[in-house]
Image: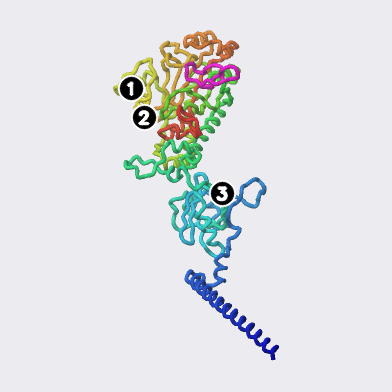
Amino acid sequence: MGAEKENLENGGASGGGDEQQSKKAAKKQAKEALKAAKKAEHKAASGKDNTNANEESEKDCSEGKYGSAGMIQSKDKKEERVFVFVHDLKNYIGKGPVWIRGRIHTSRAKGKQCFLVLRQQSSTVQCILAVNDYISKQMVKFAGNIHKESIVDVSAKVVSVPNKIESCTEQDLELQLLEIFVVSQAKAQLPLQIEDASRPENTDDPEGLNIRVNQDTRLDNRVLDLRTPANQAIFRLEAGVCKLFRDILTDKGFVEIHTPKIISAASEGGANVFTVSYFKDSAYLAQSPQLYKQMAIAADFDKVFTVGAVFRAEDSNTHRHLTEFVGLDLEMAFKYHYHEVLNTIGETFTSIFKGLRDNYQREIEAVGQQFKVEPFKFLEPPLVLQFSEGVAMLREAGIETGDEEDLSTPNEKLLGRLVKAKYDTDFYILDKFPLVIRPFYTMPDPNDPKYSNSYDMFMRGEEILSGAQRIHDPEFLTERAKHHGIDISKIAAYIESFRFGCPPHAGGGIGMERVVMLYLGLDNIRKTSMFPRDPKRITP
């Protein structure tokens, strides 16, 4: 009985503990069930009413079709990808997918769609990305978050559109994106927006309602500024001027030469030269290839030209002066009269003008979208006036100017307007300048020693070429150099080259940036210099 009682008591104690633990477990389960119910209710209210729906929302059907391309280090060739140009997309409408590399010009995400404008140099095309069975929300979101100006590779179908897309150069089609990969990410905050830098200049906007980008901001961030359609066109026109210059002169029998830019004496005389340290001595940056062109003529090259940098240490902060510019220079031997050369240069200019007009109309129109570009007018053959005739025209207009003084910039511009009104040309040649205002190597006029066999050429009333017959007699050249106060010892090699016999010759130097500026009618030469140098700017 004692054992049974003990067992009964032990059993009773044990049974009571199990019952207590069961109650605790039940209470805990009830609490967790309530918590789970509330969680399920919250998910249902959020549109995530079950586990399967949640899993499906996280599933990305576009995985592998978007993202970063990674740094391209020439690891893979991927030769199967054939990239096309935006301006050629019309040839691919309704065909298989194409690959394009371009920049994100603008982006706009709206609900389950994302609209992008892809820019490739001056060409733009609209792209659309919309959620469907093979384009995920994640992909659309990714595309909408790519920073403007980033470079991307896209695969897309080219489709025609019923209504023109006025904001793009490709107005009759758009791209339906299938894949998009970031090749180079631009930073989020840009110092200027391409849309702002591309806005048309509107002088009829007195309150400045249009956002403008000032010149210093543009030049400080020149890489961005150069991406605008107008700038893309300007520098393609510059390439066109250089190509035409080379081709036209080559066809005329000229030979391209390359001349030193570090020289021992000032090219033109005077103080407007940059001095540079040259080992234990000093040297100068060439103001002109003049002396070397002449030496090439003395070496029997007969007709030569060169395209290269020219340096002028002039503290001129004007709309048309640079301390470094591209010189288009030519020199030519002639038989009896320097007008043989003058006429050749005039023909070269008219051929360049015709080449720009006929072959670069698309670029001219692109510049015209932002700047007011008036068609450039010229005569064939070009108009040639005597310097004295130009002075007479100015005097008739009430401007007093000396017979032996150079034309001031305002008088040059006024004469340009007078010539345009009388002869309907933006290009003309002024011949027979006063000798006193020309360089030491200029041949005096044999009929009137006050004047010289020299000429300037003008576009829209501004000088773009200065030229002359050169003195080819060594004794006379020495005399004229001394008259100008030039140290003969520093140009001894130059003078010596004429002691071996040299044909009569003439030539000229052209400022390439001025030609493009004035052909387009732009107001500042910094617009036609890719990275301008002036007294206040040597960067970037």
Q: Earlier in the sequence, mark 3 or mark 1?
A: 3
Magenta stretch contains residue 266: yes
What is the total number of numbered labels drawn onto the structure image? 3
Q: Which mark is residue 44?
A: none
Indicate the position of residue 478 as horizontal and vertical percent values.
52, 9
Part of the protein shown in magenta: 263-288
Dot 2 crowding, Cα within 10 Å, few <14, some 14–19, many 20+ = some
Q: Which residue is mark 2?
A: 420
Indicate the position of residue 127 as horizontal and vertical percent values.
50, 55
Q: CA distance from mark 2 to mark 1?
A: 13 Å
Closer to the observer: label 3 or label 2? 3
Kindly tell me whether residue 350 is visible in this rendering: no
* Left/right of residue 536 with respect to residue 300 in the rendered view: left
Q: Eyeballing the image, is 486 above or below 190?
A: above
The amino acid type of the residue labelled 2 equals: Lys
Q: Which mark is residue 394?
A: 1
Which SS does the magenta portion mostly show? loop
Indicate the position of residue 347 as horizontal and vertical percent values.
48, 27
The amino acid type of the residue labelled 3 equals: Arg
The amino acid type of the residue labelled 1 equals: Leu
Q: CA distance from mark 3 to mark 1?
A: 56 Å
Q: CA distance from mark 3 to mark 2?
A: 47 Å
Kindly tell me whether residue 418 is visible in this rendering: yes
Q: Which residue is mark 3?
A: 101
